[in-house]
Image (cartoon, grey):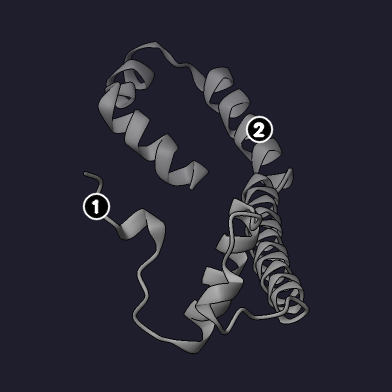
């Protein structure tokens, strides 16, 4: 990639004409020596290794997020499994809190498919 960028800049800046007009033998030798030194530092290999390490890190983070979501879902299912299900309308009283009613709705959604989420319901 460094070589590609260097070639593009070489063509864009019209460096060939500048080198032809201004450079002497010592300048050519110095530039060749700098190029050899840059090549010996293996910048391309280091950059590719950095990119691969970053991609690996992203993959690991995504896997951890996925595992965390699965764990949260399992914990929520276990919590809902421990709640007694209301089966009769008379059991719904004014003493039930909103949280308990939401839990009952979640349990009901597990048994009956097609119950829309609150976010999918239209407002008045």
Is 79 left, or right, of 91 in this rendering? right
Q: Residue at x 38, y 20 (%)?
A: 19
Above or below, 65 against 19 in this view is below
Q: Earlier in the sequence, mark 2 or mark 1?
A: 2
Q: Nearer the viewer, residue 60 or 109?
A: 109
Picture disc at residue 28 = none
Q: CA distance from mark 2 to mark 1?
A: 72 Å
Is 118 left, or right, of 14 in this rendering? right
Residue 49 at what x, y percent from top left?
69, 56
Q: Quadrant of the C terminus?
A: top left
Picture disc at residue 122 = 1
Q: Secondary structure at mark 2?
A: helix
Above or below, 34 against 64 in this view is above
Question: Residue at label 2?
Answer: 33
Q: Residue at x 55, y 82 (%)?
A: 88
Instruction: Report which quarter residue 81 is drawn in.
Output: bottom right
Q: Around disc 2, counting alpha carbons within 10 Å, would you say few (fewer than 14), some (14 to 19), or many (20 or more)?
A: few
């Amino acid at each position: 990639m460094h070589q590609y960028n260097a070639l593009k800049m070489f063509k864009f800046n019209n460096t060939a004409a500048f080198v032809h007009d201004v450079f002497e033998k010592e300048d050519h030798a110095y530039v060749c020596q700098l190029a050899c030194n840059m090549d010996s530092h293996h910048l391309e290999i280091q950059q590719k290794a950095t990119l691969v390490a970053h991609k690996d890190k992203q993959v690991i983070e995504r896997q951890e997020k996925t595992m965390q979501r699965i764990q949260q879902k399992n914990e929520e299912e276990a919590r809902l499994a421990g709640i007694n299900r209301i089966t009769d309308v008379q059991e719904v009283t004014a003493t039930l809190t909103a949280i308990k009613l939401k839990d009952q709705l979640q349990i009901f959604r597990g048994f009956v498919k097609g119950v829309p989420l609150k976010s999918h319901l239209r407002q008045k």
